[in-house]
Amino acid sequence: MNKKTVRGFSLNGSERFHPGEPEAVLRNTSVVEMEMGELKEGEILAETLYTAVCGSDVSATLGKPNFDWIERPKIIGHECSARVLELGPGNHGSLKVGDLFNPVAQLGCRKEDCAACRSGKWNLCPDKIILGYHGNGAFGQRMILESDRVVPFTEGLTPEFGAIVEPLSVVVNALYSKCNIKPGMDVLVTGCGIMGLMAAELAAASGARVVITGIEQDRNVRLKAAADRGITTVVVSEQKPLTALLHEGIRDQQGMLFGSKGKVDLLIECSGIPQVLAEAMLAVKPEHDVCLIATYPGKVELDATHVTRQSLNIKGVMGSHKEHFMIAQKLLVQGIFPASHYINLYDFEHINEAFADSIQAKTTKAVVKMN
Ligand SMILES: [Zn+2]
Ligand SMILES: [Zn+2]
């Protein structure tokens, strides 16, 4: 099996495309044959099992300027499940050939004088390296990885579901480490990409009542997936902006009014659209949290005085670390996040389709079977 030709999906160009041109994925990327180098001290060779297409991967293939920093060509991909094929020289602890695992996406510098790394928060290390952006990643059929970044599977986790541990771990960080989520809250999630859908599910599982927003193109797939799970959905547009909808009164699936006087207990912003954040923030109750999971294409114009006067807490969430991965694995095994409801599988031969469907929001989460 090690002798077979190893292929990978490579990001080559940075030509700018509009999401209305899904064929763009073919112009900035290609499937290439990969050479796997020798294993160095502390490294392992892994077989990539399933890799999920992330919104960041999609943005990079569309040539969005916030991803210009990625060196090209690069085998992208950072959300995956994998199996240990070979241990390189050095000590790998209890890790053995055949073990299933997730690599953490963000590997810290692990230096003594790095405060973030000392506390295990590699996601906050100023010198962190990100899988698939700084080195070749999980859209390669094989990966060479530092064994430090391995999080072994918890019992019962399947490789298919394991592919989405990384994005779920970020939402775990957002909801349980950063935001003060409590049962009975009214939670507004803006944006219905997979992060929004995961945030909506975990908030609902925590006993909150959730409204998730999307745009017209999300109606039939992404918002429908949420609605099928009992989550209230709304379509926002220029004619019907969110504040107007909240002011009119959004009703949940039981017909009850959501929020109180158009105000909610928690905002989780996953759209990455500056105006959505600026507007949705106005709907948060005084002294409550605005949680930012998304990144933005440029500076965001906010009513800062409103933040002061309402004593709002704006909280950013950068990635996740090992502890969040372990929690996310358990949530998947226990069905707290119902992965099968949201995953669409593609063979490696159809990787371009997986990207094109993600670009056009035809799937809630595209996961590629890598071998
Ligand atoms: Zn991702
Ligand atoms: Zn560090």
Image (spheres, rainbow, N blue to C red):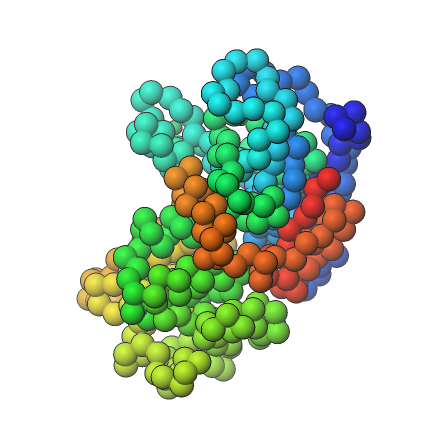
Q: Quadrant of the N terminus?
A: top right
| Foreground pick, 287 / 93 | 93
Q: x and y percent of residue 162 in the render?
A: 56, 45
Tell me what residue is drawn at x 31 percent, y 31 percent: 119
Q: Left or right: 115 with respect to 140?
A: left
Tell me what residue is drawn at x 65 percent, y 40 percent: 49
Can I make out residue 364 in this image? Answer: yes
Residue 318, relative to residue 98: is it above or below?
Answer: below
Tell me what residue is drawn at x 50 percent, y 20 percent: 92
Q: Quadrant of the C terminus?
A: top right
Tell me what residue is drawn at x 71 percent, y 52 percent: 346
Residue 327, relative to residue 292: is it above or below?
Answer: above
Q: Number of labelled discs?
A: 0
Q: x and y percent of residue 121 in the render?
A: 36, 35
Can I make out residue 26 in this image? Answer: no
Q: x and y percent of residue 261 in the render?
A: 28, 81
Residue 246, relative to residue 38: is it above or below?
Answer: below
Residue 34, relative to residue 69: is it above or below?
Answer: above
Q: In the displayed image of the protein, which residue is found farthest to the front? A: 156
Q: Left or right: 129 with respect to 138?
A: left
Q: Quadrant of residue 341?
A: bottom right
Q: x and y percent of residue 361 in the render?
A: 62, 64
| Foreground pick, 224 / 109 | 224
